[in-house]
Amino acid sequence: MRGREYERLQLMRIPLGRQTTGGCLLTAGLRTTDVDPVRYFRTGFAADLGLVGEAGGDLRPARLSVASFCPDCPRVEWYIGPAQAFSRLEEQRWFLCSFFVSQLAAQASHSVGVQYYFGPPSVLVGFLSSYWNLVHPGFLLLALGLYREAVAAPNTTMGLERILQAQIEEIRTAEFLECRAIESAMAAGMEQAQLPDTLGPLVPGDFSFLHELGAVHEWQARVRGVLRGAAA
């Protein structure tokens, strides 16, 4: 037994903290590669997002439900196409990190009326009635926390930080006051009171999803740290 299958089985043996609902283990199977996270964000993410967005139908900008990135995605037309496209990506871990960061920047720039950053050609939406509404990018970190590979990998946190720093570098090509406004809005959006802590409203209860919240809270805290450092 060699390669990815061996790594998958090794990950299954790693003990984690709070990891079950009704005895169901976190899902294994998130695909990841050895690509540098910043290189992926700058050179691979846009194409992958385009593939996933195109699978979502004819709406523009493409609406991608957070449910499409969860295990056992509902087999509903709006969600299953993007879910299937996501399942075919070679790099899924950095995709979710990049989508989180880009949505955080896009929503922040929109909220302050800055036209510099229009965001990617897809937007993050909810489930059922909330499919027609934008939702907090933090839901993507909750989705990431459903996968053992992301939780157990020692470099997920650092990769997320580096992707965020690369996004800030891009933002800072704008006028000084504009980039400060965007960064301030990003930081405000990551304050604890604003963050979602469950996928419950966005996925059917039958799935009994539980996140590795210790890891998710660590990712949230590191994002806040990067944004506060950028503002200093």
Image (cartoon, grey):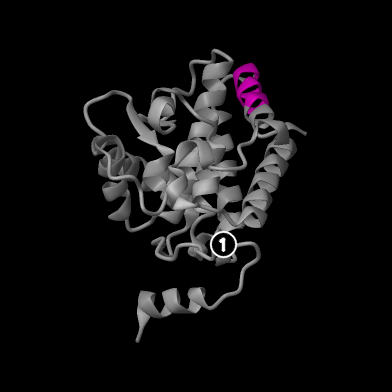
Percent x, y of residue 212: 60, 57
Question: Residue reaching furthest left?
Answer: 58
Question: Residue reaching furthest top?
Answer: 113
Q: Can you tell which quarter of the image residue 132 is in?
A: top left
- Pointer 1 local density, CA inside 10 Å: few below 14, some 14–19, many at least 20: some
Q: For the point 50% across and 29% down, which residue is it?
A: 135
Q: For the point 48% across and 15% down, which residue is it?
A: 115
Query: Disc 1 residue type?
Result: Thr
Question: Residue reaching furthest bottom?
Answer: 1
Question: Residue reaching furthest right?
Answer: 232
Mainly helix, strand or loop, the magenta region? helix
Q: For the point 43% across and 43% down, which residue is it?
A: 204
Instruction: Specify the quadrant that holds the C terminus.
Output: top right
Percent x, y of residue 199: 52, 42
Percent x, y of residue 228: 74, 36
Tell me the residue that label 1 is attached to. Answer: 20
User: Magenta span has 178?
Assistant: yes
Q: For the point 54% across and 28% down, which residue is it?
A: 173
Say whether residue 31 is left or right of residue 109. Answer: left
Instruction: Specify the quadrant that holds the N terminus.
Output: bottom left
Q: Can you tell which quarter of the image residue 157 is in?
A: bottom right
Instruction: Check the image and report above or below for 107 versus 83.
Output: above
Q: Nearer the viewer, residue 55 or 229?
A: 55
User: Magenta span has 93?
Assistant: no
Say whether residue 205 is left or right of residue 191. Answer: left
Q: Nearer the viewer, residue 40 or 25?
A: 25
Q: Which stretch appears magenta?
A: 177-185
Q: Nearer the viewer, residue 114 or 13?
A: 13
